[in-house]
Amino acid sequence: MAETEKGEKGGKGVNVSAGKLAINMQKRLTRAQEKVMQKLGKADETRDTAFEEGVSNFNKQMVEGAKLQKDLKAYLLAVKTMHEASKRLQDCLAEMYEPDWFGKEEVDSIAEDTDMLWIDFHQKLVDSAIINLDSYMAQFPEIKNRIAKRDRKLVDFDSARHHMASLQKGKKKDEVKIAKAEEELGRAQKVFEELNVELQDELPTLWNSRVGLYVTTFQSMAGVTEKFHKEMGKLSQNLNDVMGKLEDQRNIKKDSKTKTPAKSEAASNHNTESDTIPKSPPKSRRPSGPPVPRPPRPSPSREMPPPQDNTPDLFGDAASVPMPTPSPTPEVTVTAPSPLDASAAAEDNAVTNGASDSGDLPPGVLYKVKALHDYAATDGDELEMKSGEVVFVVPFDAPDEQDDGWLLGVKESHWLANKNLSARGVFPENFTQRC
């Protein structure tokens, strides 16, 4: 019994499905015939210009939205690719950065912050742009289906209208058929108008909503991108500062290894004008004890006047002073020279380039020279000169203090301003020319 009932229900289901299929096939056939009649001009077609314009805008809006969605997803893919490339680059730097270099912890922290910043940037782009755009595009398929259904119902309405008109125009009027046709026409008109009214309200609203979507999407993207680049700029500046300090650390270590005594050559202590600037002669290391004056040398060109009776004898009546020695060596005799002998000795020891003295010189000045090159003093007892300056050469207080190739002098400008020879200093003779 149960099986019989189940079989009867199954048979009824098959009959219902077959009936619906037949109805659908009949509708499709009727619509196809109606469209052919309309194209041939044998049947009029209901047209709605405003609705057709709305449908055209809808199709355009759907195409533009799909393109924006595609390009935005490509942009997000590029951001993700850039994030991966940045992460690999930061990891490479962190691996190469040695622990004893300056800012190792800062470099590791910058790499971690950079990675987190890229992740946050990508996620915010998805939240502010992709999600809204996906929701926006999700409504188009449903509306597109409703537009297609409205077009089918319009064809059904036109077909029912034409069938009703043909029955009314016939010679033999069948009231039953006319009543049935009128009922079908009313039903088709109702369905069509319901869809048509809904779409006429929705399509303009949807068309206008695109502006708000574009504004929201690109404003959000612009804000997120601006914040990302601002934060990334700070990290880049921090990395730049660390690299600069690392370079300073390298230079300091390099300088400490290659640093040499500054007084090896005088040419490195003044501004060179050409490759032909001479080097200053080396200054000898003198002992820390009292200087031993040189024996006086006779000068054939000068006559020594006899000492005056009123001149005090600084060394007494003794002509020589024996120098004690730890071993039996010949006795060294030191003779105190007179001021004139010291002047003559200084003049004889100086290697000069020019002619004899010219013009009136201040008292105590042997001659004057002119600087050919700049010379920067490297010691407290040296005289700094500029090319073209004139220097008065004066004798050393003790002739043995004079090193070979070095002179003692006072700038002419100092003499003219102060009228004294107190600002003395030694300088290399080969930087000057006698004038």
Image: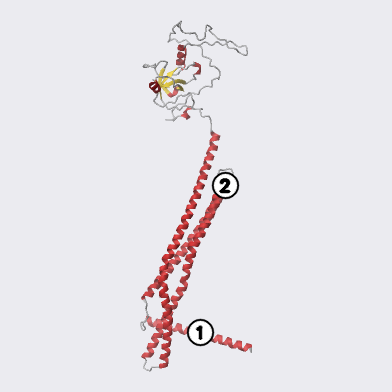
Q: Is residue 261 above or below residue 179?
A: above
Q: Judge left or right: residue 224 versus residue 112.
A: left
The residue singled out by tag 1 in the image is 20
Asked where in the image residue 162 lies, by quadrant, the reply is bottom left
Where is residue 406 drawn, in percent x and y?
47, 21
Q: Is residue 352 visible?
A: no
Residue 287 vertical position relative to residue 262 in the rendered view, above or below: above
As drawn, 54 above or below 231 = below
Regarding residue 198, the answer to whether it shows in the image is yes
- Extreme-bottom residue of the structure: 172
Report the number of discs. 2
Dot 2: element? helix
- Please tell me which residue is depicted at 44% across the width and 15% down the height of the picture: 347
Q: Residue at x 37, y 90 (%)?
A: 168
Comparing 239 with 11, the one in front is 239
Which element type, helix, strand or loop, lies under badge 1?
Answer: helix
* Residue type beneath disc 2: Glu
Amino acid identity at mark 1: Lys
User: In the shown orientation, is residue 107 left or right of residue 434?
Assistant: right
Q: Residue at x 57, y 46 (%)?
A: 104
Q: Earlier in the sequence, mark 2 or mark 1?
A: 1
The residue wearing badge 2 is 105
